Amino acid sequence: MEPEIITAGLDGSAEGLAAAHWAADEAHRRGAVLRLLHAWILLAAQAPDTAPERDQNIYARRVLQEATDAVRDRHPHLRIIEDLVGDEPEPALLRASAESRLLVLGSRALSAWESFVLGDVSLSVVARAAGPVVLVRAGGPGPRDGTRPPTQEPPDGPVKATGPRVVAGLGLGGPAEHLLAFAFDAAAGRGVLLQVVHGHPLPVQVYTPWGVDPDAAGEVTAATERELDDVLRPWRVRFPGVPVQRTVLPDSPARAVVEAAPGAGLLVVGRRRHHRLPAPRIGAVAHAAIHHVVCPVAVVPHD
């Protein structure tokens, strides 16, 4: 059986190097092959014995070499494929996503204005990728920061979990098999708690002229928790070693995942593959997570 491939896209930035380190740690954990990919549209054909001073691809080769050397310092025995591709970054990364178990990219911290201008290559790839894409910020927590042996299972409920964990934002309006499979697998591989977060704005009937009716709000939340339990039950059976905490927050799904993410080692959110709009989009939850969450964010496509 061929080993899995985890691809890190490089662009010579600190964020790209952070993605390479995250991907290397993940490949080491999974026993996978790490592919370091750099797309260089100006890649020139030249003889193998070309002198260094005449190498037109010297910058592109340096990007790959520096990332490889950095990864080797941490994982000297990891199998690494260096892939220099003569193409635009977006199509090269989309092909890599179709060929890989996971695609890992660097993510820059954006200003408030840039958060609404989705011209970044990483965001375009996330919206079109065939498989999961993980976005990593430079200086953010990596997989090792979110890894520890599991402890006793915490109680369910709206109390925020703290410490190393995987957080998954889960909606109840459609299939979530791919998202939950990724989230449970990630938590199991790290030996940490999986916190499943569901944002559920309170319906208008729970409001009164003097505020929220606590009894009505409690009934709505309890009904949502029961529905969430039904969805999670088969996954808890499949992954008995993963402690799970479900968290229902009376807020929008996007705000709920952002509120729950601080301190997590990884946030997992979903993205629908098919939309009514002709242009690909990532959705409000993934958009909020990518722009406002510091930890690595995994965006998992699903139908």
Image (cartoon, rainbow, N blue to C red):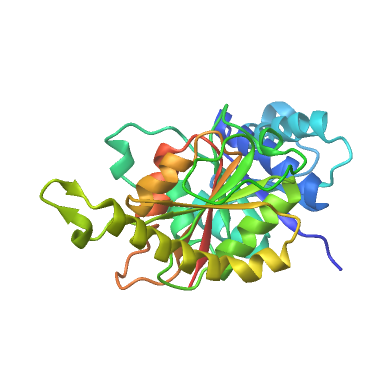
The residue at the far right in this view is: 77
Say which quarter of the image contains residue 58: top right
Q: Nearer the viewer, residue 197 or 210?
A: 210
The residue at the far front in this view is: 215
Provide residue 124's location: percent of width, then percent of height.
43, 53
Name the residue rendered at 34%, 51% in the picture. 250
On screen, residue 288 above or below 204: above
Name the residue rendered at 57%, 35% in the picture. 162
Report whether residue 174 is seen.
yes
Say which quarter of the image contains residue 132: bottom right
Judge left or right: residue 131 versus residue 287: right
Provide residue 228's location: percent of width, then percent of height.
49, 64
| Quarter the N terminus occupies | bottom right
On screen, residue 123 above or below 161: below
Provide residue 176's location: percent of width, then percent of height.
52, 68
Q: Nearer the viewer, residue 138 or 155?
A: 155
Report whether residue 82 is seen.
no
Q: Nearer the viewer, residue 66 or 24?
A: 24
On screen, residue 96 above or below 293: below
Count of labels in the image: 0
Provide residue 213's location: percent of width, then percent of height.
23, 53
The residue at the far left in this view is: 209
